């Protein structure tokens, strides 16, 4: 027969084993999702250095002088272009006309086309004279001196451009040497950094490999611990026979341990007490859920009823407005007809009748408003009385219509 103290120790041991298994499961889950980069003692992966590139300076370009010389024919004072042709055309036409008038000849195709060859002949003659004049100007000493002066200026300018080009070539060659020297220095530094990078990368990979091995060993060890603890837990459950299978969880075990460690109850009585407490919690939870559902349904029904009442009130108000509008229109029509009849009757009698009708309309309006306010007050008082009755029953209040 197992004693009360042994039951307490056995249940406490069961709780320790259950908590150990849960904690080891959490640790395994953490390790399975952990990476090397997330670990606290991991090395930072080295970054490969950038390889230098050899640049080339811009090669200078040779600049040449554009030699432009004056045209000798453009300096000729002879007429050129279309103007001589136009003058020759009009002159030939006028000469042909004078010839035909002097000889008293009739106009025919010959006289019509005769100005064309005359115009071409004059143009050829003028062009020949202009070319001869241009050749004469070109062979003159002033023109030759001008051409020689332009050549001297162009040669001087070209010599200046050549000197600038030679200087730019020297600077270009020096820049190439400087760029090459800088590239060689950067290349040596890159080779050194690359060697350090490869060394650090090998260390990083080795540290990552070792971490992975230790990580796998830790997971295997935790799984073995869980397996051993589970075997011990099952053996203890089977050997003691204290806790049925449906109560083999931490919540139930804690409740059982709390009961037997603070009282004289045995495990069986603690299980019955736990079942009762659990059943009460479930009943209370179902009761709260049911109350919440009923409350929501009641609120929804009350809201629907209030909306329906409000809708009916609005509809009745619209109908009442329509009735009053029709009545006012009928009264206005009657008043208009009475006014037209009053023109054929005596003024005092018509004024008295109109005053009586107005007083009667006001009395009807006041009486109707009094009846409407009385009915609204009665309905509001009825809602207040119903809420007092519902408060005594512990039910929520209905919405009270506002004063108006």
Image (cartoon, grey):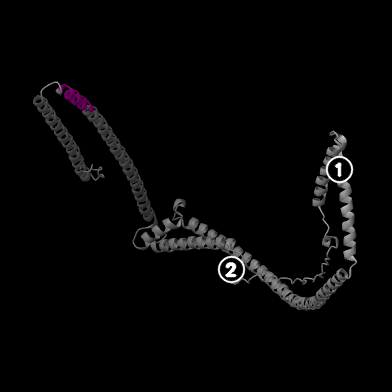
| Front-lying residue, 77 or 4 | 77
In the shown orientation, is residue 373 left or right of residue 270?
Answer: left
Q: Residue at x 87, y 49 (%)?
A: 122
User: Could you tell which of marks 1 and 2 lies nearer the N-terminus?
Assistant: 2
Residue at 87% across / 47% down in the picture? 120
Q: SS class of the residue under badge 2?
A: loop
Residue 321, image x, y percentages? 25, 32
| Dot label at residue 116 | 1
Give the alpha-carbon distance from disc 1 to disc 2, as whole Å: 107 Å
Q: Main secondary structure of the magenta part?
A: helix
Quadrant of the snapshot with the N terminus: bottom left
In the image, which residues are magenta?
329-341
- Magenta stretch containing residue 337, yes or no? yes
Could you say which is closer to the camera, residue 58 or residue 279? Answer: 58
Q: Quadrant of residue 201?
A: bottom right
Q: Residues within 10 Å of mark 2 (few under 14, many from 20)?
A: few
Closer to the camera in the image, 78 or 188: 78
Residue placed most toward the observer, 90 or 61? 90
Query: Callout 1: helix, strand or loop?
Result: helix
């Amino acid at each position: 027969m197992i004693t009360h103290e042994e039951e307490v120790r056995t249940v406490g041991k069961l709780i320790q084993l259950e908590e150990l298994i849960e904690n080891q499961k959490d640790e395994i889950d953490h390790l399975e999702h952990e990476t090397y980069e997330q670990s606290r003692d991991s090395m930072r992966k080295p970054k490969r250095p950038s390889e230098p590139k050899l640049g080339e300076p811009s090669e200078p370009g040779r600049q040449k002088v554009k030699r432009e010389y004056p045209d000798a024919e453009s300096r000729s004072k002879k007429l050129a272009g279309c103007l001589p042709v136009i003058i020759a055309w009009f002159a030939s036409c006028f000469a042909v006309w004078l010839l035909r008038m002097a000889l008293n000849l009739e106009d025919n195709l010959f006289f019509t086309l005769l100005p064309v060859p005359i115009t071409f002949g004059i143009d050829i003659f003028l062009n020949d004279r202009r070319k001869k004049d241009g050749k004469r100007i070109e062979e003159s000493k002033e023109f030759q001196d001008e051409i020689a002066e332009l050549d001297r200026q162009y040669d001087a300018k070209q010599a200046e451009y050549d000197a600038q080009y030679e200087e730019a070539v020297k600077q270009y060659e020096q820049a190439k040497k400087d760029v090459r020297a800088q590239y060689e220095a950067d290349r040596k530094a890159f080779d050194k950094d690359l060697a350090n990078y490869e060394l650090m990368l090998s260390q990083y990979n080795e540290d990552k490999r070792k971490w992975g091995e230790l990580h796998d060993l830790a997971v295997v060890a935790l799984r073995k611990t869980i397996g051993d603890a589970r075997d011990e837990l099952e053996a203890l459950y089977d050997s003691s026979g204290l806790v049925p299978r449906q109560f083999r969880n931490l919540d139930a075990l804690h409740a059982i341990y709390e009961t037997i460690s603070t009282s004289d109850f045995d495990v069986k009585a603690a299980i019955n007490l736990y079942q009762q407490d659990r059943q009460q919690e479930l009943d209370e939870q179902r009761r709260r859920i049911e109350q919440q559902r009923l409350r929501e349904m009641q609120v929804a029904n009350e809201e629907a009823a209030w909306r329906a009442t409000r809708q009916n009130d609005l509809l009745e108000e619209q109908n009442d407005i329509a009735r009053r509008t029709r009545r006012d229109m009928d009264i206005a029509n009657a008043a208009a007809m009475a006014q037209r009849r009053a023109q054929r009757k005596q003024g005092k009698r018509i004024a008295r009748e109109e005053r009586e009708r107005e007083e009667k309309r006001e009395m009807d309006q006041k009486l109707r408003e009094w009846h409407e306010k009385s009915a609204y007050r009665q309905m509001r008082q009825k809602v207040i009385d119903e809420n007092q009755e519902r408060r005594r029953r512990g039910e929520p209040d209905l919405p009270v219509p506002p004063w108006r």
